[in-house]
Amino acid sequence: MSQSRQFLTVEQEPFLIVRSMACDYSSRHIITPHQHDWHQLLYARAGAMTVHAGRLSWMIPPGKAVFIPAGCSHSIRMWGSVKMRSLAFPTRFANPAFEVDECRVLSVTPLLSELILRIVSMPALDSRVFTHQRLLGVLLDEMSVAPVEPLMLPLPADSRALAIAQHVLRCPCDDEGLDLLSRRYGAGRRTAERLFRTETGMSFGLWRQKVRMLDSVRLLSEGKSVTDAAFDTGYTSVSAFIAAFKSTFGCTPGRL
């Protein structure tokens, strides 16, 4: 890991309205569970990240960002050579961008990207500086209207359904059907299907497809070819994989 940060003075602390940090990580580096007193925006300028919080996880592909509310215990795993750019906001500010109870992945527009990078270069915004206040205002406006990406993967709470889910996470390309998996982990097919629908909001088939899509981001970020990523996530047709990827992420895997 490499880290770039300028030093702030103790006298600045009461006036800080945004803190920033730039860190680079090698693939598969893990930041263990922790939480912050400030809200946090993590931008994956390069590489991908997986953020875990409780029974939920979020994949952050290159060029996306994840908002993490203050007090949310989370861990992070890096995929590929990650260039993480981080902004932190005090909880005393009321703003629509902060009115969420859980993490969410944001689509980063060119303007939002430039704002993040500009503030990271500073390395903090001070409420006594008028230009800093204006920068924060535009940043929050952009965060408030940024599209939220459907990159969250929930895990079921029931022990039988969770065992099935963990099997799929270990082997995304495994084509074993729900009938076989249900019997292996002590549940009937109908019971397992019902548990996935009620506890993840998705059918088992859609849940597994999402696992494969999110895992393909990891593979591509670590340098796998589009063809290898397709086959390694259980697709027998590269064109079908590309179509599913574009439908999920809004871009082709080659562009990612």
Image (tube, rainbow, N blue to C red):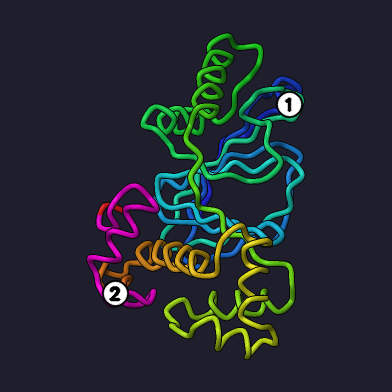
Tag 2 secondary structure: helix
In the image, 218: left or right of 225? right
Tell me which residue sits at (50%, 52%) in the image.
Answer: 151
Near-viewer residue (51 or 199): 199
Placement of 32 over or under 96, stated as above or below: below
Circle 2 residue: 228
Over which residues does the magenta segment extend? 231-254
Tag 1 secondary structure: helix
Q: Position of residue 42 (x, y in %)?
A: 55, 44
- Identify which amino acid the numbered label 2 is placed on: Asp
Tell me which residue sits at (45%, 44%) in the image.
Answer: 64
Give residue 13's mark.
Answer: 1
- Where on the picture, by quarter, is residue 115? top left
- Identify which amino acid the numbered label 1 is placed on: Glu
User: What's the CA distance linking mark 1 and mark 2?
Assistant: 49 Å
Give the number of the mark in front: 1 or 2: 2
Q: Position of residue 245 (x, y in %)?
A: 34, 58
Q: Position of residue 216 (x, y in %)?
A: 39, 66
